[in-house]
Image (cartoon, rainbow, N blue to C red):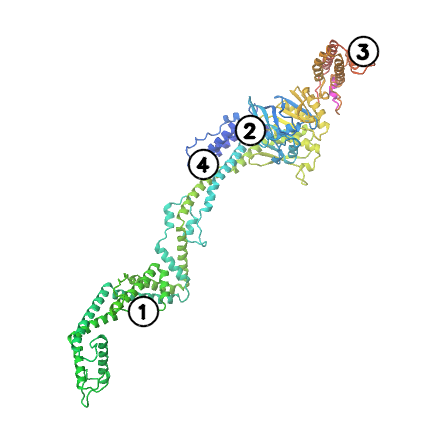
Amino acid sequence: MKDDTTAAGRLKGGGAIEDILAWSSGKLSPWKQDALRRLACHSVLTKADHSEVLNLIKASVGFALTPKPAEPIPLEKAHFGSASAGAPLHIKAIRNVENVNRLVPAATLTFAPQGLTVVYGRNGSGKSGFVRIFRTACRTRVEKPEKLKVLADVYGTSHGPQKADIEIENAGAEEVVTWTSGGKAHEALLHVAVFDSSAAQLYVDGGSNIQFLPFGLALPHKLNELCLELKAALDAERKPVTDQLSAAIVHFALPRQTAAQLFYSSLSAKTTDEQIDNACAFSENDQDRLDLLTRLLSGGATTGADLTALATWIGKVSTECLALFEALTDARIEQARAAKTAAVEARSLAGLDSSKLFKDEPLPGIGSESWRRLWQAARDFSLAEAYAGQPFPVVTTEEKDATCVLCLQPLTAEGSDRLERFEAFVVGAIATAANDAETRVQEFRSSVPALDCLAAADWGVRLDQITKRDAALGAALANFKICVESRRALLNALLEGSKGAEAAPPQLVSPSAALQALAEAVSREADAAKAAYDDTARAKLSEERAELEDRKGMSLSAITLKKRRDLLHKDSQYADALAEVVTTAITKRANELVDVHLTKVVLDQYKTERDALEIAHLKVALARKSGKTTASFQTNPGTALTKFASDILSEGEQRALALAAFFTEVSVTDGAGPIVIDDPISSLDRQRGLRVAQRIVAEAQKRQVIVFTHDLIFFNDLCHEADSERAPLHTIALFADGSNAGKIDPVGVIWKGLNVDKRLKRIKNDSVAVKKQYTISPADYEVGMKNLYGRLRDTYERAVEEVIFCDVVRRGSDRVETQKLRFVHLADALAIKFHDGMTKANTHSHDNPEVAAVQTPTPTDFEADLAAIETLIADFRAEHQAAESKRPSMKPTR
C-alpha cells in the first residue's frame, strides 16, 4: 500500500498507535505503561484494576505494601487488538418499560440489528418516552445532567422508579442491560450516540466533543482520566494525614529565630528520635537559669540593691540559724536540765542548813531564795553606795556605830552580830555551792541567742522571697523557726522550773547551709542584675531567655514532634505518589497526538458533512479546544460580535449545523456503534430534509441507525432512500389512546406511508380475514371487500407516480427528479391493462346505484384482480429496465 502522509492516511495506517507506543516506552513510568496496557485491552478498568495500579504507584514511592503487586507490563502493539473498533454493538430491543411518561406498562420496541429502523408516530404517540430512555442510558450531549431526568406519568397514579431492559448484542454475545433513571450508564451503551433537540443546541454553540477517540488516540485521555481518579483516591487517603498534621503542631509564645523554632521549622520525615530528644532536652538547671533570667530582666533599676540586701539578710539568718541550732541541741537542753536540777538540790541543802542556824530569828525564811535576793541587794547597796570601799557588812565605823543597810537604823550589838552571822552563812561552803549551781543555771539562760532575724518585722516578706526562689528551703526555714521557738520555750520553762519543762523537744534541722548557698546565689544574682542594665548584656540575657523558653515549650511536646515527623513521612509519600499522577505532560502529549492524527480528519469530515447538508456557505467552523480527558472541537461563529452561533443562524441552519457536527463526531469515533436520532428535520426545508434522509441512509449502511419521527413525508423519504440504496429497513408505528402512549400498531405504519409493494402486501394480508366472511356473513363480506377494492384503487394511484413515472414527481414532494425520465416508457397494452384494473377497482370501491347490476366480487375474482395488478407492476418495471438498456449510458445524479 502506498504510504499516505496525510492526516487521514496516518490515522488509517496506524501512525497514531506507533506514536503512542514510542511515547509510552520513552516517557512514561512503568505503572503508567501498565495502565495504558490495561486500558488498551479493557477500555475501562475495574475497581480491582484501580486498586492494583494504585498499589503500583505506592510501591514506587516507598509505601509499605503487602503483598507487593506484580511487575507492570509495558504497552505493546498487540495490546491494541481489543481496543480498536472491535465487534459492533447492536441494540435489539427495549422491553419491560415501567413508569416512563405515559408509556404503556411493559412497553416494548424491537429494532433491526442491521440498517435503518424508523419509528413513526404522531405527536403524543410515545416516541419521546423511548428517546428519553436512550438519552439517559447512552451517550448524548448534555449541558445539565439533571435535565436528563425521566419522569413518570405526572397525571397518573403509578409509583416507583423509571426502569427498562435494553437488550443488546455486544461482540457477538447477547446481554440485557437494566436501565434505571438516574443510575450509572452501562459501559457498552456509551458506544451508542443519541441526537435530539437538546443535543442539537449544544452542537451548535458548544462544538463537537469527540468523546470516543479512534485508533488508540483515546488512550492518553483515558490515562489522564485514570490519573484524575487515582488523584482523588490519593487525596482522600491523604486527607486524614493532613488533618492530623494540622493538629500535631507545637505552639510558641512568639515567632523568633531560636534554635528550638529553627529545629521545629526544619523538622522532616528524616529527622531521627535522637535529634528530637536532643533538641527537646531541658534540665532542672535550665529551669533555674530561666527563672533567674526572668527575674533579672523583669526587675527595676533598684533590683541589684534589693538583691544585695536580700543576700545580706539571708546570710545573717543563716548565721542566726547556725547559732540557734548549736544553742538548742538536745545535748544543751539536757545539760541545762542537769544544771537546774543541781542548783535546786544545792539550794535545798542550803535551806536545810539555814533553818538550823536561824531557827530563833524573829522572822521565818532566812536563807530562802527571796531572802537571798534581798541580802544580795543589800550587799550591792553597801559596796556601791552606803559604804563604798569597805567590806560587807559594815558594823562599826571610826566616828560612830554603823547603820544597818536594810533597816537604816543604828546597829546595836545584836544587829551587828546578826549581820555578821548572815554574811558568814551566805559565804559559807553550802551556800556558795548553791550559789554556784544557780549561777550555772543563769549562764545557760543567758547563753541562748536571741531571735533577731527570725523575729524581725520584715520576717514574713523575707520568708516569702526565699520561698519564691526555693519553696522547699522556705518551708524548712519556717519550720526551723517554729522548732526554735518551741525549744526556747522549753528551755526557759526548764530553767525557771515552770510548767511544760518535761515536754519532748521537737526535732531541729538546721537550714543554715542551704541558706548560705542561697545567699551566695542571690549575691551573684545581684551582681548580674547590676550588670543587666548594660544594653549589650541585657540583649544577650534576653536571647538566652528566649532560647530557654522555646526549648522548654518544645520539651513538653517531644511526643507531638515524633508524631509530626511520622506524619510528615507519610505525607511526603502521598506527595510523591500524587506527583506520579500529575496530568500536565500527558495532556500536552495527548493534544499533540490529536492535532497530528485527528484534527485535520475532523475538520475535513466537518466540511464534508456541511457540504452534504448544503450549508457550506455558513462561516461557522470548528477550532481545537484542549482538555485533560477529551479532545474537543469548539464551534467558532466566525465573528467578533458574538461567541454563539445560535445568535447568527436561523433555526433550520442551526439544526443542519448540529447534524453536521453530530455526523462528524460519529464518523471519527472508534467502532461503529449505533446511533439514535430524534426528529432530525425540525425546522428544515424540504431540500435539506431530503439531504438528511440521504445522509441517514448512507450511515445506516455502516452501522445500526434508529430514527424517531412524526413527519410522514420524511418517513417516506427515508423509506424511499433505503429502497433506492437497498439498505435494510425496518419500520415501527406508534400510537396513543386515552389511557397510554407507546402502543405499537401491529399492522405497521399508516396506509399513506406505504409504497406500492407494501400496500399490496397489506391488501393480501387483510384479504385473508375478509374471504372467511364469504360463507359466514355476506353483509360483512361486502363491506370488507369494498374496503379492499378501495385500498386497491389507492395502490393504482400510487403506482402512477412510483411505478409508471418512476418517482420523477411525487405528491407531497417539491422535487422533480428529471434524470429518472429515462426509465419512463408506457406501452399501449400496459396502459390499457392499467385502465381496466383501475376501472374495476373504482367500480367495486364506489357507491353504485341500487338498480345497477354490479355483483360483489367473489374471493376468486378478488384474487384474480390482485394478481393482475401485481403482474402489471412487474411488467411496468421490466419495461422500464428494457427501455433504459436501449439508451446510451448515463451517470445518474441526484
Is 300 above or below relative to 868?
below
* Residue 3 can be seen, yes or no: no
Residue mark closest to the camera, 4 vs 3? 3
Residue mark closest to the camera, 1 vs 2? 1
Sequence-first disc among 4 and 1: 4
Residue 678 image position (x, y, % from top left): 66, 28
Alpha carbon separation for disc pair 4 and 2: 28 Å
- Picture disc at residue 452: 1
- Kind of residue indicated by mark 1: Asp
- Kind of residue indicated by mark 4: Lys
Res 287 → quadrant: bottom left
Alpha carbon separation for disc pair 4 and 1: 79 Å
Quadrant showing the N terminus: top right
Residue mark closest to the camera, 1 vs 3? 1
The answer to the question of whether label 2 and label 3 lie on touching residues, with beta carbons closer than 8 A, is no
Please identify the dominant SS of the magenta region: helix
The answer to the question of whether label 4 and label 3 lie on touching residues, with beta carbons closer than 8 A, is no
Chain part drawn in magenta = 815-822
Query: Which residue is at the far left?
Result: 429
Q: Is residue 290 left or right of residue 757?
A: left
Mark 4: secondary structure: helix
The residue that label 2 is drawn on is: 187
The residue that label 4 is drawn on is: 58
Sequence-first disc among 1 and 3: 1
- Picture disc at residue 854: 3
Q: Nearer the viewer, residue 375 or 48?
A: 375
Mark 3: secondary structure: loop
Sequence-first disc among 4 and 2: 4
Quadrant showing the C terminus: top right
